[in-house]
Image (cartoon, rainbow, N blue to C red):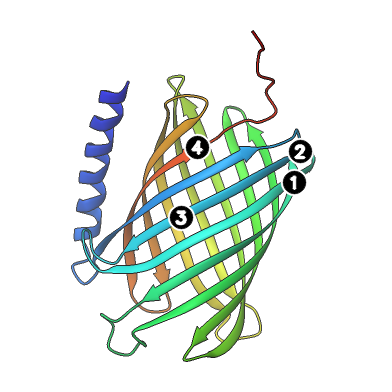
Amino acid sequence: MLKRFISISIIFLSITSAIAQNAPEDELGIWYILATNSKVSEKLSIQAQTQFRFYEFASELQQFKIRTGAKYRIMEGLSVGVGYAYFRNDFSYLSETPPSFDEHRIVEDVYLDHNIGNVNVDHRARFENRFIVRDQDTETRHWFRYMVKLSYPFLDRWNADVYNEIWLNVGDEPTFAQNWLGFGVGYKFSDLIKSRVGYQKIHLDGPDFDRILIGITFTPDFTKQTSTP
C-alpha cells in the first residue's frame, strides 16, 4: 500500500506540474503541512497545524503558519469551532510589497456535513479577524470564507476530494478577495496517521497561483479506553 501511495503521488505531482506549466507567468509553489486532530471527548476535538508555504517549488519561503483551535459537535451534522493562527509573511520577491510582516488571526467556524450516497459533503463558514503588524503598527481587517468539499472513499484506505472556497472582504473594497479551487488524494496508513497530496489554484484579483499541497495528519483518539494488564 505504501508503494502504491508513493506511485500515485508521483503521478499526481507530474499531472499538476503540467497543469501549472500551462501558465508560464505563474510559479508552481508547494505547501508542506503537518497537523493533528485529537478527539478528547465524544463532542470535542482539538486541532493544531503548521505549514511551510513556498512560493517556488523548492525555494522562497513565502509564508510560515501555525494554528491551533477547537471544534465542538452540537448535533449530528452541525459543529462550531474557534481558533487562533500566527503567520510570518515574506513577500520580498514582490517589489511592491514590504519585505516581511506578522499577522495574527482569530477565527470562528460553523461546520455542516452530510452524505449524498457514498460522497461526503462538508460545508464550512468562517469569519476571520486579521491583525496585521507592520513596523509596530497594527491594522485590523476581516474576511468571510465559505468552503464546500466533496470526498469519496475508495479501496478501503483511500479517498479523493475536490473543494472550492471563496474569500470575501468584510468592510473593505473590493468585496471579492480570492478563491481557492483544489483536489487531492488521501491515504490512511492507520487510525493514527493520514496523508494527502493535492493541487490548488489560488485566484486573486490579478494573477493566479498554482500550489502543490503535501500533508500528514495525526488523529489520536483519547476517548478510547486503554486496556489494563
SS for callout 1: strand
Image label count: 4
User: What residue do we see at 69% from left, 48% from top?
Assistant: 71
Q: Which residue is mark 1?
A: 72
Counting from the top left corner in percent of width and height, residue 195 is at 41, 37
Toward the front, the furthest residue is: 229
Which amino acid does the dot numbered 4 rest on?
Answer: Phe
Q: In which quarter of the view is residue 228 placed?
A: top right
Q: Pick whichever of labels 2 and 3 is earlier in the sequence.
A: 2
**Contact (CB < 8 A) between labels 3 and 1?**
no
Q: Give above or below for 220 relative to 190.
A: below
Residue 28 figure quarter = bottom left
Q: How far apart are the alpha carbons under marks 1 and 2?
A: 5 Å
Amino acid type, residue under disc 3 in the picture: Thr
Q: Which residue is mark 4?
A: 218
Q: Nearer the viewer, residue 144 or 19?
A: 144
Q: Is residue 75 left or right of residue 19?
A: right
The crowding category of the residue bearing disc 1, from other C-alpha atoms within 10 Å (few below 14, some 14 to 19, many at least 20), is some
Mark 3, mark 1: which one is toward the viewer?
3
In which quadrant is the N terminus drawn? top left
Categorize mark 2 by other alpha carbons within 10 Å: few (<14), some (14-19), many (20+). Answer: few
Q: Which residue is mark 2?
A: 43
